Amino acid sequence: MRPSIHATRPRDLRDDAIHTLVRYGVNDQGSSPLIMTEVRHAGGAIRATSGDASPIGHRDVDYVLSLVAVTPTPETQQAVAAHVAAFKADLAPALDGVYMNFLDGDETRTCTKDAYAQAHFQKLMQLKARYDPQDRFCHSFNIPVAA
């Protein structure tokens, strides 16, 4: 079985965002393909680090949302992916980037950019072009080579 982990960063948790969390995390029939819908408070050390001290962005958000499911078959992988996509689409007005530590699977490639402030990501792409133009370090949280 393969875990499916998805992470994002809600800016705030107003009533409409909370209703979305409950609807997708539990749903009306009391079931969901997710085994965990976790909201963590992201203050403290995350927020205390200056935005210029690290390229990691979105340090000013209050919460980190982590969604976890077990996907033993391709069918359940597709069902979870569809559920998470709909969940994130409905929650989109409250979201701001991703939290890199919780990215998993395809999201480590498709959402890495969303973990950085835009200017920092551009700088990382320039550094990648200079020091790794063949893109040998391309696994996990890949930074593409700047064009």
Image: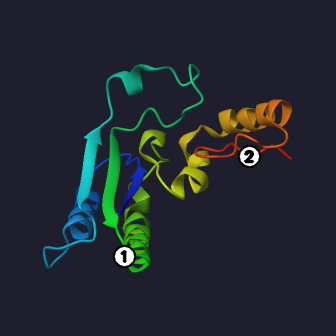
| Residue shown at 31% from the left, 62% from the top | 69
Return the residue found at the far left. 30
Q: Could you classify mark 1 by the number of other residues whose Cα lies within 10 Å: few (under 14), some (14-19), or many (20 or more)? A: some
Question: Looking at the picture, how far across and down is residue 96, in whole percent?
Answer: 47, 48
Mark 2 residue element: loop
Closer to the camera: disc 1 or disc 2?
Answer: 1
Question: Looking at the picture, how far across and down is residue 76, in whole percent?
Answer: 36, 76
Q: Closest to the observer: 16 or 113?
A: 113
- CA–CA distance in space, label 1 to label 2: 30 Å
User: Image height check: is 139 above or below 91?
Assistant: above
| Residue shown at 78% from the left, 43% from the top | 135
Q: Which mark is residue 76?
A: 1
Question: Looking at the picture, how far across and down is residue 103, in whole percent?
Answer: 46, 48
User: Image height check: is 73 above or below 67?
Assistant: below
Return the residue found at the far front. 1
Given the image, on which type of amino acid does mark 1 rest? Thr
Q: Closest to the observer: 23 or 132?
A: 132
The answer to whether mark 1 and mark 2 are in CB contact below 8 A is no
| Residue shown at 44% from the left, 76% from the top | 74
- Where's the N terminus, which quadrant? bottom left
Query: Image quarter for residue 56?
Result: top right
Mark 1 residue element: helix
Q: Which mark is residue 63?
A: none
Indicate left or right for 28 with 124 as reference: left
Q: Closest to the observer: 2 or 11?
A: 2
Q: Could you classify mark 2 by the number of other residues whose Cα lies within 10 Å: few (under 14), some (14-19), or many (20 or more)? A: many
Given the image, on which type of amino acid does mark 2 rest? Pro
Indicate left or right for 147 with 29 as reference: right
Q: Which mark is residue 144?
A: 2
Q: Earlier in the sequence, mark 1 or mark 2?
A: 1
| Residue shown at 38% from the left, 77% from the top | 79
Question: Looking at the picture, how far across and down is residue 87, in whole percent?
Answer: 36, 67
